[in-house]
Image (cartoon, helix red, strand yellow):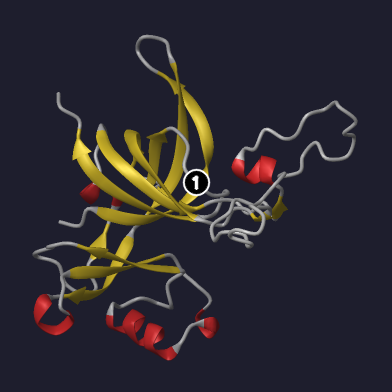
């Protein structure tokens, strides 16, 4: 069966365990997702399924996407499409995969999302630099990166040097989150801990393994 679904981040809340400890929770609206395409080794060279989630603005989608949505018996183009690799037997185009068919309370999952954008940031915010000294006549270089290279040899700045620049909007994966609760009526998944991205952002939730009882 499918081991992952697409969701949308709703927000965060908290709950209490039986021992009285507070558990931070992230609420994610997961599915239902529709299968757009089933790939196999004969035609595509690998096995995978293409999942669709939500309702997008059809006039902005390309004709191939609209054609796939029509084959899967969708009313319009989906808001998000992802591909999950794996050997999935017994599934076909048009099947609807709901939250309860994939996840259960106590499951161990990973979440993939896009981190919040923070614009152009300096080295202290972007890379965690400690900054320069606040004394010895220095008054305006407290948050500067300092030296970025050597002299004549090599006479250039090496690639990959940590410097100021665009911060955020990166693909981030958070592992080992536990399914705390499932709300089947509202398709809400409660995960212990935080996930990347802002409210309303799309997420990919994949099951890793179940906790041993």
What residue sits 83% from the left and 40% below the top? 141
* Residue 55 falls left or right of residue 162: left
* Residue 14 falls left or right of residue 184: right
On-image quarter of the N terminus: bottom left
Residue 75, image x, y percentages: 40, 77
Q: Is residue 46 above or below residue 60?
A: above
Q: Is residue 188 above or below residue 74?
A: above
Say few, some or many: other residues with alpha carbon within 10 Å of mark 1 (under 14 / 14 to 19 / 20 or more): many
* Residue 92 falls left or right of residue 25: left
Q: Is residue 93 above or below residue 189?
A: below
What residue sits 21% from the left and 50% below the top? 101
Among all residues in the image, which is located at the extreme bottom?
63
What residue sits 14% from the left and 84% below the top? 43
Q: Is residue 164 visible?
A: yes
On-image quarter of the C terminus: top left
Residue closer to the observer: 43 or 171: 171
Q: Is residue 184 visible?
A: no
Residue 178, image x, y percentages: 32, 33
Residue closer to the observer: 195 or 140: 140
Residue closer to the observer: 141 or 156: 156
Q: The residue tagged with tag 1: helix, strand or loop? A: loop
Residue 165, image x, y percentages: 67, 57
User: Which residue carries the number 1 mark?
Assistant: 196
Q: Is residue 69 above or below residue 120?
A: below
Number of marks present in the image shown: 1
What residue sits 25% from the left and 46% below the top? 207
Among all residues in the image, which is located at the extreme front?
152
Residue 35, image x, y percentages: 26, 69
């Amino acid at each position: 069966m499918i081991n992952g679904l697409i969701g949308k981040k709703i927000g965060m809340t908290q709950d209490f365990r039986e021992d009285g400890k507070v558990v931070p929770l992230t609420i994610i609206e997961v599915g239902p997702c529709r299968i757009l395409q089933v790939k196999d080794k004969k035609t595509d060279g690998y096995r995978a399924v293409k999942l669709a989630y939500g309702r997008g603005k059809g006039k902005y989608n390309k004709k191939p996407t609209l054609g796939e949505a029509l084959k899967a018996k969708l009313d319009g183009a989906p808001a998000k499409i992802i591909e999950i690799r794996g050997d999935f037997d017994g599934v076909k185009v048009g099947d609807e995969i709901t939250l309860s068919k994939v996840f259960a309370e106590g499951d161990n999952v990973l979440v993939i999302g896009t981190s919040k954008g923070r614009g152009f940031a300096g080295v202290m915010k972007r890379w965690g630099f400690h900054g320069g000294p606040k004394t010895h006549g220095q008054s305006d270089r407290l948050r500067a990166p300092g030296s970025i290279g050597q002299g004549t040899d090599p006479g250039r700045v090496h690639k990959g040097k940590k410097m100021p620049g665009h911060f955020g909007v990166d693909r981030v994966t958070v592992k080992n989150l536990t399914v705390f609760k499932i709300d089947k009526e509202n398709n809400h998944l409660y995960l212990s801990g935080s996930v990347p991205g802002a409210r309303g952002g799309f997420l990919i939730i994949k099951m890793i393994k179940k906790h041993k009882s």
